[in-house]
Image (cartoon, rainbow, N blue to C red):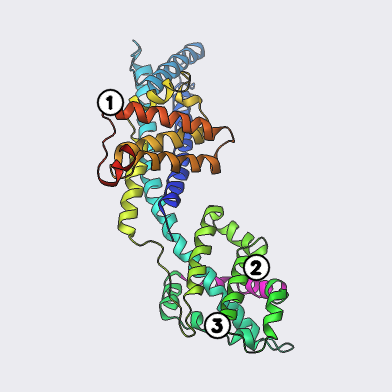
Amino acid sequence: MLNRRTLRIKIMQSLFAFEQCKEANHLLALDLIEERFQPDLNSMQPQDKDLLRQQKKIATKLFEKKFKTKETTESPDARINEAVEAAQQLFDKQVKKDQAYLSKNILVEIEKLTDLYYQVLTLLPEFATLAAAEKKIDHSRFSKQPLVQALATHAELAAAVLKSGSLWARHKDTVRSWFKEVIREDETYQEYLVAKNPTVDDQKALCKHLVRKRILGAGVINDFFEAEDIRWAEDREIVKSLVDKTIKSFDGTTVVLQKLSLDWEDDKLFVNKLFTSAIELDESYRQLIAQNTRNWEVERLPLTDRVILEMALAEMLSFPNIPVKVTINEYIELTKEYSTPKSRQFINGILDVISKTMKESGAIKKSGRGLIDNK
């Protein structure tokens, strides 16, 4: 099931992508300036290449100054000013477009987790169908297993698969090879086939084993999901948890499908607010980071560390009900997982100092649960 740490990871990944998009957009803006001062090969008039190179150099310098400091300095040459303005407009337009796309895409990527969960669940009935077709070996212990049949006949699961389209219908040969080479050869599976009167717990144990070790464990099936899902390294653990709970819910007759989120509307609000707040973090807070990093410019920090710091400050400022210590601890955990070994202590120290400064200035205003660590 989703938790706030998972949501923070998804937001961090999108903010990282957003920063990379900004770098690409910056290059596009510079390319526009380059194009504006290329000789016009179709002109009948002679081209002053030295003048064009000089204009391009000045325009580039003015654009970079505006880009970095937000200060606008105009040139006496109108053509240079027009090129700088056009480059800035292109950059702003692309950034706005990327922000809108990534903001929407975070939710799309999270919602895809449900499809991944269903895909893993429906692999078990797919394998059971292939097992039933086997002639040389009696696979009925598995193919007719009540737990697998409960999944195969689950109306809600079938409707969801029908709506999104069955992934396995498009990969029949692949699934068949998985059954022959992975499932059928598994020692635990073979032992189950000859077991006498397997109990409900035995059924659960086998399905859990197949999912954890053969489907989601290291191997060709896991590799398939990894190729399909760019975020599989994080998504796999969520899917594993949902499938485990589904198997555990089996009562001998039915299974209960799990919800990805207990309150999806609240989770969506959290995602949208934190993503937007981090992007729109006031420049003064970025300067506060710089002041506490031995006066390094924020841009000189490793991108992952910068994203984590800005997310943490945005969360402290925008979510009154989340205690400051909870926020700091969460982002230290993200640092341990996604940044360099030395970054954990660095991030911890920076956030501790900045949070105290922000509390003293009144910038951080907490209420409800958010007051817990301030007592």
- Mark 1 or mark 2: which is in front? 1
Residue 236 sits above or below residue 203 on the image: above
Residue 2 sits above or below residue 24 on the image: below
- Mark 3 or mark 2: which is in front? 3
**Majority secondary structure of magenta residues:** helix
Q: Can residue 62 be seen by looking at this rendering? A: yes
Q: Is residue 373 left or right of residue 16?
A: left
Q: Are marks 1 and 2 in contact (CB under 8 Å)?
A: no
Q: Secondary structure at mark 2?
A: helix
**Mark-to-mark CA distance, 1 and 2:** 55 Å
Viewer-proximal residue among 363 and 90: 363
Say which residue label 3 marks. 200
Q: Amino acid at mark 1?
A: Ser
The earlier-in-sequence mark between 3 and 1 is 3
Q: Secondary structure at mark 3?
A: helix
The earlier-in-sequence mark between 1 and 2 is 2
Say which residue label 1 marks. 361
Say which residue label 2 marks. 214
Q: Position of residue 276 (x, y in %)?
A: 34, 41
Q: Position of residue 221 (x, y in %)?
A: 63, 65
Q: Amino acid at mark 2?
A: Arg
**Where is the N terminus found, in terms of image quarters?**
bottom left
**Mark-to-mark CA distance, 3 and 1:** 60 Å
